[in-house]
């Protein structure tokens, strides 16, 4: 059955893109559904849970059966009462427990969720599997259920928010351009905007409207170009380092608010900031304090009173360590910080700090279909080997038809046409399909 997930193209839809058939082949005692959704302005998982509770619960039951898990827990925020009530009967009938969570960031981090659900602490830099757990995002579970019914992954569910006229959540064929996705949400109220892809905390900035939706795109958030978040995202790495070197006063707020530090991992971004003072040698003394950073962004975007860039310093430090083939190993036991609960960051405060309150709104499900004129399906949109095309230019394809594949032994999944039409172009990066009636 797990092979079916590979041929139907199921990967982690929450952003990781890890092939789901690998998780389905593992043995665990506890299966966790991640419906925590804590990126500001993103509401697609909430809408999905309201619309498809039966499919999601059924997908989870299938994963529990495949992995031998005897305990299932479903994490969802208590504030999302409609989603909770929609899920409740479907979970109860399958003996899956509801795990009601507070409205904090980052509640959906796997380390946090595993600890909250089981009291187990994942080994430093480890995986949930090492403590007998597996975690899947709710959209992935929906895709698992569909795959088991023979339906490949061809659409992506996402939220479009910010400066658009109709903030909403809807399905789009994979490979649809950002331009067409924004138009589907009524267009933007100004031309002077930038996009944050999949979230403002952990997502990436984008100015290219010809970029396309992949299996891991969770949201498009349009913000004014002069918004402080966009200004910070577009500050050059060199300027970030220069400002950090001269302005960091080692107050250590970044460390004291770091969720991984509070869970007991040896991550201390204020010490990593000291590495900015070195050019040729010396930084390696401080870089190891970055190894266990998960790039949640809280230190840079919430904690630092000077608006510095400790997350980015951690990312640079990790890349330096990779280049030097050095891997830090935490020897001390992981012990939860006594102040952990008191230092949680409520979403409301986070939105205020990020100056996003004006853009917060519901993003209701819009059932109308999205009909792009063409789609560009990337051959590499999952962890592992890129898929190899099995179609030719000019060939007619049906929606759902396999267009690219990986071998049985390669890590990766097959890709499928997300619209019916003709293959208009094949490159080393993508297969492009023009819609039949465009
Ligand atoms: S919070 Fe900012 S100023 Fe304080 S130690 Fe961290 S980076 Fe430096
Ligand atoms: S981004 Fe900052 S707050 Fe988040 S895990 Fe890394 S160091 Fe900690």
Image: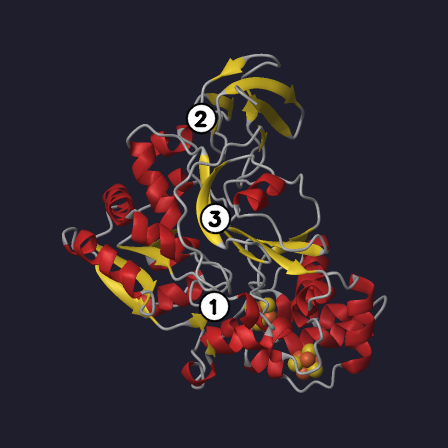
Q: Residues within 10 Å of mark 1 (few under 14, many from 20)?
A: many
Q: Residue at x 55, y 63 (%)?
A: 294
Residue identifier under label 3: 158
Residue 278 on image: x %, y %: 82, 72
Taking depth in this image into account, of 222 and 40 the one nearest to the observer is: 222
Q: Is residue 75 visible?
A: yes
- Where disc 2 sits, the SS reads loop
Check the image and name the residue furthest to the right. Answer: 280
Taking depth in this image into account, of 222 and 144 the one nearest to the observer is: 222
Taking depth in this image into account, of 366 and 125 the one nearest to the observer is: 366
Q: Is residue 187 above or below residue 40?
A: above
Q: Quadrant of the C terminus?
A: top right
Residue 301 on image: x %, y %: 62, 72
Q: Is residue 276 above or below residue 27?
A: below
Residue identifier under label 1: 106
Q: Nearer the viewer, mark 3 or mark 1?
A: 3
The quadrant in which residue 408 appears is: top left
Taking depth in this image into account, of 25 and 228 the one nearest to the observer is: 228
* Cα–Cα span, label 3 and label 1: 19 Å
Q: Residue at x 50, y 26 (%)?
A: 406
The quadrant in which residue 338 appears is: bottom left
Q: Residue at x 67, y 27 (%)?
A: 428
Whichever of callouts 2 and 1 sits on the residue coming sooner in the sequence is 1
Label drawn at residue 160: none
């Amino acid at each position: 059955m797990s092979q079916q997930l590979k041929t139907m193209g199921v990967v982690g839809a929450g952003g990781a893109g890890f092939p789901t058939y690998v998780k389905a082949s593992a043995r665990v005692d506890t299966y966790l559904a991640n419906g925590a959704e804590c990126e500001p302005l993103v509401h697609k998982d909430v809408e999905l849970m309201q619309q498809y509770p039966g499919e999601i619960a059924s997908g989870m039951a299938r994963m529990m059966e495949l992995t031998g898990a005897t305990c299932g827990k479903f994490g969802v925020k208590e504030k999302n009462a409609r989603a909770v009530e929609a899920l409740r009967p479907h979970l109860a009938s399958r003996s899956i427990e509801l795990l009601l969570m507070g409205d904090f960031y980052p509640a959906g981090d796997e380390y946090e969720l595993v600890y909250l659900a089981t009291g187990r602490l994942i080994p430093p830099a480890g995986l949930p599997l090492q403590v007998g757990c597996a975690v899947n995002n709710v959209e992935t579970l929906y895709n698992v259920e569909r795959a088991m019914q023979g339906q490949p992954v061809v659409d992506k569910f996402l939220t479009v928010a910010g400066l658009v006229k109709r903030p909403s959540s809807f399905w789009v064929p994979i490979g649809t351009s950002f331009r067409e996705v924004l138009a589907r949400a009524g267009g933007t109220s100004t031309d002077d905007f930038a996009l944050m892809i999949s979230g403002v905390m952990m997502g990436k900035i984008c100015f290219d409207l010809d970029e396309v939706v992949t299996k891991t795109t969770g949201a498009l958030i349009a913000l004014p170009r002069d918004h402080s978040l966009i200004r910070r995202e577009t500050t050059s790495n060199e300027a970030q380092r220069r400002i950090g070197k001269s302005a960091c006063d080692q107050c250590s707020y970044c460390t004291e608010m770091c969720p991984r530090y509070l869970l007991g991992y040896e991550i201390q971004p204020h010490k990593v900031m000291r590495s900015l003072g070195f050019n040729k040698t010396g930084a390696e003394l401080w870089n190891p304090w970055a190894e266990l950073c998960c790039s949640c962004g809280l230190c840079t975007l919430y904690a630092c009173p000077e608006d510095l860039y400790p997350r980015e310093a951690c990312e640079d430090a990790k890349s330096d360590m990779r280049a030097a083939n050095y891997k830090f190993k935490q020897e001390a036991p992981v012990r939860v910080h006594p102040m952990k609960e008191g230092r949680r960051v409520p979403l409301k405060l986070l939105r205020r700090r990020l100056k996003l309150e004006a853009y917060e709104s519901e993003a209701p499900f819009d059932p109308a279909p999205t009909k792009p004129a063409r789609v560009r399906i990337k051959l590499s949109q999952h962890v592992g080997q890129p898929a190899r095309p099995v179609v030719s230019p000019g060939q007619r394809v049906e929606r759902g038809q396999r267009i690219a594949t990986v071998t049985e032994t390669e890590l990766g999944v097959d890709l499928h046409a997300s619209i019916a039409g003709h293959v208009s172009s094949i490159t080393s990066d993508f297969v492009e399909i023009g819609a039949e009636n465009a």
